[in-house]
Amino acid sequence: MSTREIYRNPWLSVREDVIERPDGTRGIYSVVDRPDFAVVIAAERGGFHMVEQYRYPTGGRHWEFPQGTFPQGRTGTAEELARAELAEETGVTARSWTELGTLHSWHGASGELCTVFLATDLAAGLPRREHEEQDMRHRWFPRAEFERMIKSGQIRDDSTVAAYLLLTLHERA
């Protein structure tokens, strides 16, 4: 019925929509608008490259696959974004890229999409992290350790866990 923006910063905006349900009653729906993002599974030698950083909302450091959005004002394809995020956060580049799928990251509150890529045939380099990523760490984990980290709760990032499921399904095909 109507919409109004109630908050905006360089990374997201929040709007409040007045909606009409199928039975004719009205309500309010809050929507978080964020740019789409990419998640990269950089795989080699039976394991994965991960990054760890402090996540303010949870008050802790967390391991996850490299992921992110384009900076404000920059656009491109999902693969261009994935290539940029991997190089920026880890310094790693890849010669082979496979798109594994696209997921809604928070479909109850946002239309934001996450595109998951498998990056292989890797080469090491120096990271070019953004200012906000200055505390980030990069490390390679063997697959068995990665799976133990999910089971033990050391990896709680839903995008990382969902990306791993897409990889597992891809490997079975």
Image (tube, rainbow, N blue to C red):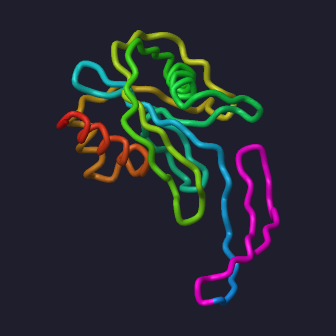
Percent of width and height locating residue 68: 57, 36
Query: Residue at 65% across / 89% down in the picture?
Result: 24
Residue 161 appears left or right of 145: right
Question: Which segment did they paint magenta?
Answer: 1-23
Above-or-below relation of 95 to 137:
above
Nearest the viewer among 17 and 40 is: 17
Left or right: 40 with respect to 1? Answer: left
Provide the major secondary structure of the magenta segment.
Answer: strand
Quarter of the rendering containing residue 169: top left
Instruction: Report the front residue among 119 and 90.
Output: 119
Query: Where is residue 132 shown, x and y percent of the image?
Result: 67, 35
Q: Is residue 7 magenta?
A: yes
Residue drawn at x 43%, y 37% is 116
Q: Position of residue 111 (x, y in %)?
A: 59, 55
Left or right? Give the position of 122 relative to 37.
Answer: left
In the picture provided, is 159 more to the left or to the right than 173?
right
Spot the residue most to the left: 172
The foreground one among 138 and 43 is: 43
Image quadrant holding the N terminus, namely: bottom right
Q: Is residue 80 magenta?
A: no
Q: Residue at 19%, 36% (x, y): give it.
A: 173
Is the residue 122 above or below the residue 110 in the image? above
Q: How many marks?
A: 0
Q: Residue at x 71, y 45 (%)?
A: 11
